[in-house]
Amino acid sequence: ADEPLILGIETSCDETGVGIVRGHTLLADAIASSVDEHARFGGVVPEVASRAHLEAIVPTMDRALAEAGVTIADIDAIAVTSGPGLAGALLVGVAAAKGYALAAEKPVYGVNHLAAHVAVDTLEHGPLPEPAIALLVSGGHSSLLRIDDLARGVTPLGATIDDAAGEAFDKVARLLGLPFPGGPWIDREARAGDAGAIGFPRGLTAPKDLAAHRYDFSFSGLKTAVARWVEARQRAGEPVPVADVAASFQEAVCDVLVGKALDACRTSGIETLVIGGGVAANSRLRAMAEHRAAKHGIRVRVPRPKLCTDNGAMVAALGSHLVAAGVTPSRLDLPADSAMPL
Ligand code: KG4
Ligand code: ZN
C-alpha cells in the first residue's frame, strides 16, 4: 500500500548527499560538504572534492538511513547523479550506488543532476504542473529548461555561454574581499546597498544578441565591468562602496535571469516557473521573480534554500518520480558522464 522508498545519492560537485523519500515525502537528507576545504583556493578543486566524497560517502549513507529509521533492505530503488558534474566526484557516487545496489539487490537509476534540481521542488510543493519552465542557477550551471514530462521530456532552451550565475557571484564577491562561496555574502551586503547606484551591463539582452541567444546567458562581461569599476575607484584613492556594488551587481544578474525566464513562459504560454540551484537561495532573485511573474499570471515555485543547493534529496525525488512513471532502471554498468545531456 505504501509508495516505494527511494534513496538518492549526489556527488557531482562538493556536497556528498544522501536523501531518502517516500512519494513526495522527505524522510532524510544527510549531507557532508567539502566547501571549507576549497575556500582558500577560491573555487572547487576537483581532486580535493573526489577525496572528500570517498571519505564521506559511507558515513553519510549510514546517517541518512538512521535519520529515516530504515535499513538498506527496506529501500525499493537507488537513484544516483550520473552527470553532469566533476568526473572524479561523480564516479564516487556512481560506484557507491552500484555497490549498494548489487549487495542489496536493488534497481539503480542513473539520473541527470539538472533534472534533479527541478524534481526537488515536488518535495515542497507536490506534483509539478506540466509543462513548466525551469530556471536552474548554481555555481556550475545556468540553464533554462522546458519541462513537458519530468521523467522523459526535458528540453534545454538555453544556457550560459561563459560563467555560471553562481560563479559570477563568487568572483565578484572575491574582488570585493568577501569570503567563498560569495553568493550568500553578496546577498547580505546588498540589503544595505542601492541597487540603482551603478548601471552594470545586462548580458545578451541587446536586440542583436537576442536573435541567436534569446534564452542564453552571459555573465563574464558583467564580472569584468564590476572589476573595472572597482579598480577605477581604487586608482582614484576612493573607498569602494561594497553594499552598492553588491546590490547593483545582484540587480543586473537577477534582472537578466528573471527577464529571460518570464519571456520563455510567456512565449510558450506556460504558467509555471520553477527556480532551483544554489543561486535560487538569493533573496532578491526570489522577490523579483514573484513580483514580475504575478503581473503576467505566472506562478513561481522555489523550494526552500536548503533544497536549492546540491543535496541527496533532489536525486531521491527524481528517482521517486521515475519509479512512479514506470521508467526502466539503468543497467549496472551505467557510466558517470561529466557532460551528460538532458
Ligand atoms: O547548487 P549549488 O549548491 O552547487 C552547484 O551545483 O554549483 O550552488 C552553489 C552556488 C555558489 O556559487 C554560491 O555562491 C551560490 O550558489 N549561492 C548564492 C546564494 N547562496 C548560494 N548566490 C546568490 N545568493 C545566495 N543567497
Ligand atoms: Zn547543482
Image (cartoon, helix red, strand yellow):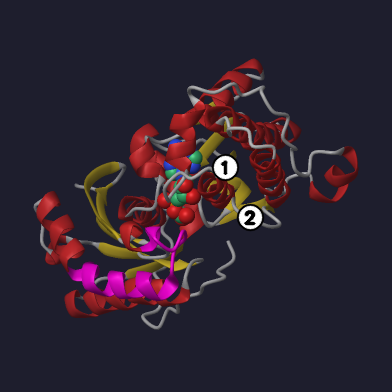
Q: Toward the viewer: 103 or 208? A: 208
Q: Say if residue 214 shows up in the picture.
A: yes
From the viewer's side, name the closer residue of 229 and 54: 229
Q: Amino acid at mark 2?
A: Asp
Above or below 118: residue 246: above
| Residue at the far right in the pictured view | 208
Most common secondary structure along the magenta stretch: helix
- Which amino acid type is marked by label 1? Ala
In the image, residue 327 lies at what x, y percent?
43, 62
User: How many neighbours does mark 2 have within 10 angstroms: few (below 14), some (14-19), or many (20 or more)?
Assistant: many
- Quadrant location of the C terminus in the rendered image: bottom right
Snapshot quadrant of residue 184: top left
Label disc, if present, on residue 163 of the rendered structure: 2
Reply above or below: 286 against 5: above
- Callout 2: CB less than 8 Å from ligand 1: no
Residue range of the region highlighted in magenta in the rendering: 38-58
Disc marking residue 100 = none
- Where does residue 214 sit, x and y in percent of width and height? 78, 44
Please report the residue visible at 41 percent of the width from the left and 58 percent of the height from the top.
326
Say which residue label 1 marks: 134
